[in-house]
Image (spheres, grey):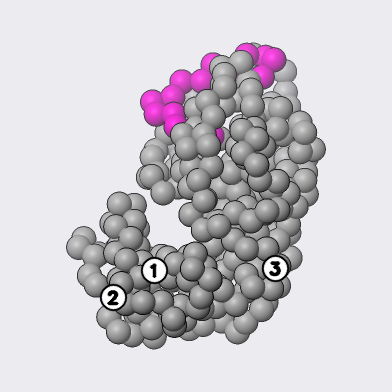
Amino acid sequence: MPRSKHAIAWVNAQRNMCLEELYSLVPSTNRGLINETAVRLAASATAIQTDIASLSIADRKQAILMAKQFVNHLGISTNAVIPSLSDIELNESIEIGHRLLQITSHRGEPIRYYASIPGAGLIDNCIADGLSDSSVVEIKSGLRPFRSEDIRQGLVYAALIQLCRSGSNAKTLCLINPRQGCISEVSFDQVVMRAGGLGWLEFMQRFEIYVTNPTSFLPQGPIILLQQMKSICISSILHAPQINGIQKETRMQNTQFADKRTFDAKVDVTTIYF
């Protein structure tokens, strides 16, 4: 995204601090599992309209198992073999999950966690952290501010929802960090305008062309050579070439897949604009 730093700075400036920051009592080596378990517990409690404390032992064990399988699949733990959560770590997961439910309870819209989104063209079916009637919900439980990758992820989901007419009406991106106790909810219209100077309609037109036929994405006719291509490059959609003649860019980049619950890959992208 040509103005991603500007856009993410604005998104972070919109944060509403709902709770005091939660400081961890355990090393960060197992934090990926702690954070994922927290969301799984919150999702389980939401599904049966209860709180985490009221979940059965079986429900808790199932949530922990699914979190462990997910973390192991993505390789986001620093441990070669993912250990079970200690009592302290499990308590931290429960507290983060409880904070997530506290923050989302004030939105007035129920969240469907791990919501399926139909794929289109180059993009396979996706699983978002959450969807509500009006929002794409992304949950980050780290110690960092929100990043441009978080915006791109939400944009992909919102565009797919509109393109596939899946029944949702996602107008806003809702970023939540239950560990930091904050929420930032911004309109997709504002996001694409601040990130790329586009209106939402123009962004959607480019998105649809790109995912269905990337080689004819621009009138100038880009030549795109991809060793692996299963993701949508939002930066390409938001950033049209500004010069005449030949512009060539070759780079190795980490690409966030539309279904972030699959895996990341390195993509060798060579683009020539005529």
In what quadrant of the picture does the C terminus appear?
top right
Q: Is residue 194 visible?
A: no
Give the label, 3 or 1, closer to the camera: 3
The residue pinned by badge 2 equals 85
Circle 1/circle 2 CB separation < 8 Å: yes
Q: Residues within 10 Å of mark 2 (few under 14, many from 20)?
A: some
Under mark 2, the amino acid is: Leu
> In terms of secondary structure, what is the magenta stretch mainly?
loop
- Return the mark for residue 107: 3
144 and 199: which is toward the camera: 199
Instruction: Verify whether residue 231 appears in magenta.
Output: yes
1 or 2: tag closer to the N-terminus: 1
- Give the x, y percent position of residue 273: 62, 18
Range covered by the magenta-colored residues: 218-232
When asked about the image quadrant of residue 247, the answer is top right
Neighbour class for label 1 at 10 Å: few (<14), some, many (≥20)? many
Q: Secondary structure at mark 2?
A: loop
Q: Dot 3: within a 10 Å radius of its alpha carbon, few (fewer than 14), some, or many (20 or more) residues?
A: few
The image shows residue 171 at horizontal and vertical percentages of: 73, 49
Question: Total marks drawn?
Answer: 3
Q: Residue furthest front?
A: 48
The residue drawn where x is 52% and y is 51% is 115
Is residue 174 covered in magenta?
no
Picture coordinates of residue 42, whole percent (x, y)? 48, 70
Q: Quadrant of residue 34?
A: bottom left
Point 59% across, 44% down: residue: 157
- Asked whether, in this view, residue 143 is left or right of residue 160, the answer is left
Residue 6 placement (x, y as % from top left): 71, 53
Q: Is residue 160 visible?
A: yes
